Amino acid sequence: MTQAAERVRHAGLRDKIMSAEQAADFIQNGMTVAVSGFTGAGYPKAVPTAIAEKAKAAHGRGEAFAIGVVTGASTAPECDGVLAAANCVSFRSPFQSDPTLRNGINAGNTAYQDMHLSHVEQQMRQGFYGAFDVAVIEAVAITEEGKIIPAMGIGHMNEAVKAAKKVIIEVNTAQNAQLEGMHDIVHDIGVPPYRQPIPLVGPFDRIGAPYMECDLDKIVAIVFTDSGDRNSKFADPDDNSKRIAAQIIDFFNHEVKAGRLPKNLLPLQSGVGNVANAVLAGLLDAPFDDLTGYTEVLQDGMLDLIIAGKMKSASATALSFSPDALQRFNDNIEFLRDKIVLRPMEYTNSPEVIRRLGVIGMNAMIEADIYGNVNSTHVMGTKMMNGIGGSGDFTRNAFFSFFVSPSVAKDGAISCIVPMVSHHDHTEHDVMFIVTEQGMADLRGKAPRQRAKLIIENCAHPDYRDQLRDYFDRAEKAEKVGLHTPHLLAEALSWHQRFVETGDMRVK
Amino acid sequence: MTQAAERVRHAGLRDKIMSAEQAADFIQNGMTVAVSGFTGAGYPKAVPTAIAEKAKAAHGRGEAFAIGVVTGASTAPECDGVLAAANCVSFRSPFQSDPTLRNGINAGNTAYQDMHLSHVEQQMRQGFYGAFDVAVIEAVAITEEGKIIPAMGIGHMNEAVKAAKKVIIEVNTAQNAQLEGMHDIVHDIGVPPYRQPIPLVGPFDRIGAPYMECDLDKIVAIVFTDSGDRNSKFADPDDNSKRIAAQIIDFFNHEVKAGRLPKNLLPLQSGVGNVANAVLAGLLDAPFDDLTGYTEVLQDGMLDLIIAGKMKSASATALSFSPDALQRFNDNIEFLRDKIVLRPMEYTNSPEVIRRLGVIGMNAMIEADIYGNVNSTHVMGTKMMNGIGGSGDFTRNAFFSFFVSPSVAKDGAISCIVPMVSHHDHTEHDVMFIVTEQGMADLRGKAPRQRAKLIIENCAHPDYRDQLRDYFDRAEKAEKVGLHTPHLLAEALSWHQRFVETGDMRVK
């Protein structure tokens, strides 16, 4: 059987096979395009470059060429990167992490809307983004009936093919054909007032089909590709990460002993990044078995828990592995088949499901302030990093929500505990635990001034504690309006200002 | 039949009838007490005063006496007010609005934790507040089986009687006995990982029983009272409120015509206050029928929509009326019986249900900033007003979410549109529409700088537009770090600082 016949089993659709350049002809200046991809998995590998080339040619002729791009989450250099380098992304939403795109956003070239990931699919369906002209998605294969088998990431793909007028499918032969059967996709969740409960009551419950449905008449192009996902390496957990992980695991032990947490904990969510991954690595040696995962992106740490027999099952919308972990995944795919399920992101990030299951959320942060507000997105209040992703979906609805970060960055020039965060992504109402390598602050049941003392004494780096105590003391003493949340308004953001001006938050 | 026999139908429980002073003897220094009440409805009227007297006597003897108080939401002078005046509230959560209590919070006498209302019951059940010693709740009556019929507000009462070791019930004979049957209470929603979907698919669905269950052995006291709820008057909608309402109704018209909203809209939520109430008043004359309500507190505006036949049914956790509206409610209670349902607040404020139903959220705010962040709780960043209430539960999960405010306060000395809000309760990720009497900003699908232009030009008061344009322009030009969210860090909170120092946000 030919590659085309194997991967595009629907005979009629084989007529749509064409080059990426031909497929890119369906994308015109001014269009809004839904592009698959979630944390470096499941994104198209060829068509974006063809679009970028088309844009550069148009720009070379002095013609305008720019498109709006709505993805599941972050993609990779050959998707967000090439489009941003061609300066053809007028609008982008939601999460992103490509350096070139980020530069474009922070140079003011790309209008970027930073959304909670659970909102994306429903707002597409409800028309809040306007019309979608084209969807470009990655698949492993297309079935005899023309149903689509996604690859390592689903993200918003299920809604993208419904919302878009035309669909371009990249069939990626480098993706393991054995992924077939690992997805769980409900065709349509509906719009209010015609929605029903999501019947997920356990993290591994299957409530849909392993295939994604798409109106075949919409499929205008099928492009073959054969290159892998982004597969960035993780750093090995460093001492700070290990200290953070140890505190969270100690807390779990304490809660299990007190009877407030089941022995196998509750479903775990872990955000992207090395620190969150380190917590999962720490669980390899912790006295908890039969763990479960309910997360948006499943990375090395969770994979290793499953392979080691510590975690019995996990649900995610994307698999984002280092090259080594990808090898382990492919080597063990038959063992993993009944332990990992991939869902559309409106299910993995659903407030309904997260709250019902009692997910334990663990997410990285840029900084927290003394009152427990968290900044996940902006450097010095003005520069967008990657976006909020699903951290708000999980934090607001989690049973326990942890925000983790080393207490300082840039060799101590930046304190991750500040008087007031320079951007608010998670408010004092949402944040339960702040953990740095210095210690943990349990903010539950605490008023702002109580939180301030805990966060300063437990979480701040010793180099910054006096400076924070001084701010807090003076704010309390100077307060004329109200002592509930004492602040020196003229100084609240001065630490960031000082860093911008001098390169250091420390008062010399 | 005696009053006691009519209202306490369980013969055995009549032995527990005693005075408020006797009941207050169950409350000791250092206890945590769950007190019923939600927006001036359903709070105990007699026992709090007895506790306050006990505290004052103890303080007079030089003894410590303070308790932690966790309510459903705000109560009234004879509950929060008397306790705060006796300076015996060491901890308080969640929403409050009593001036004496607010002063205590802002003087630093009461540690106040401002919670999302949907979190309160589940965190009580999960032990996050620690143990509850006593619950003090208001009821209309107790049935033959000892089941409790709540009065005009349920709030967190269903969890309070389960979480507390002892229960004191105030049976209020001033409350209409015909309220029996209007409540819908699920005995136990469970804790993760044993939770099931909440089977509400329409705002008026009944999924529980009209009575609240309580372990009879826990009931230590029954106190009779006969005074009404807070019943504050509403101001008649002023011109600003009417202008705000008209814009929202215009938008509804537009969306219905475009086919993006059903003809009977979607279930309406309206926060407390005059402006939100004015929107509902505006719907009396709007071309929408068969409206529904899914809200936390049902006030005059929604009642009048139901009585006028414009709204077919509404769900709430409390009925908070002006004296006139209370009369209309009581006069029409048989007509209203199959149109109003009262539920525990973890159902009315459930993210699961709000998102499924596609509730339209309309909430007042203190201020918004040019990037779409909203402050609902703090005056000048430091003084707590009433708390976040359910505004976060609704805003985050609503189909449409509106924040409304007149564009200026204090005769123009305060702009409700500022460069940066002085406290963040709803972030840029959550806020869809900002509406003032000047106009509306539709922030959907917009990046921060696009939002800034819309909010300044559409929503700010003309007296402040130049000042806002100037801030935004200079922030864009001065930006060295990132142009995604331009700010002048040293000036971002200067408008509030200026108001504190000079009494006016305007630059003279």
Image: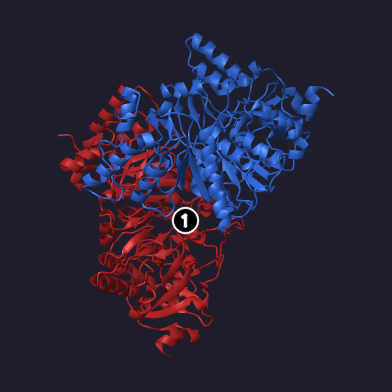
Chain colours: A red, B blue
Number of disc labels: 1
Image point (50%, 31%), residue name: B93
Query: What residue would you read off at disc 1?
Result: A118
- Residue B196 locus on image (x, y percent): 60, 53
Left or right of B225: which side holds B435? left
* Residue B367 position within the rendered picture, expressed as x and y whole percent measured from the top left: 42, 36
Q: Which image quarter: residue A469?
A: top left
Q: Percent position (x, y) of residue B432? A: 46, 48
In the image, taking residue A110 as reference, residue A343 lies left or right, namely: right
Q: Residue at x 50, y 22 (%)?
A: B99
Q: What secondary structure is marked by label 1?
A: helix
Report crowding for label 1: few under 14, some 14 to 19, many 20 or more residues within 10 A (C-alpha): many
In the image, A242 versus A370, the foreground residue is A370
Chain letter for mark 1, please.
A
Asked if residue A151 lies left or right of residue A411, the reply is right
Kindly identify the amino acid type of the residue bearing the numbered disc 1. Answer: Ser
Image position of B158 with respect to A476: above or below? below
Note whether residue B109 is visible. yes
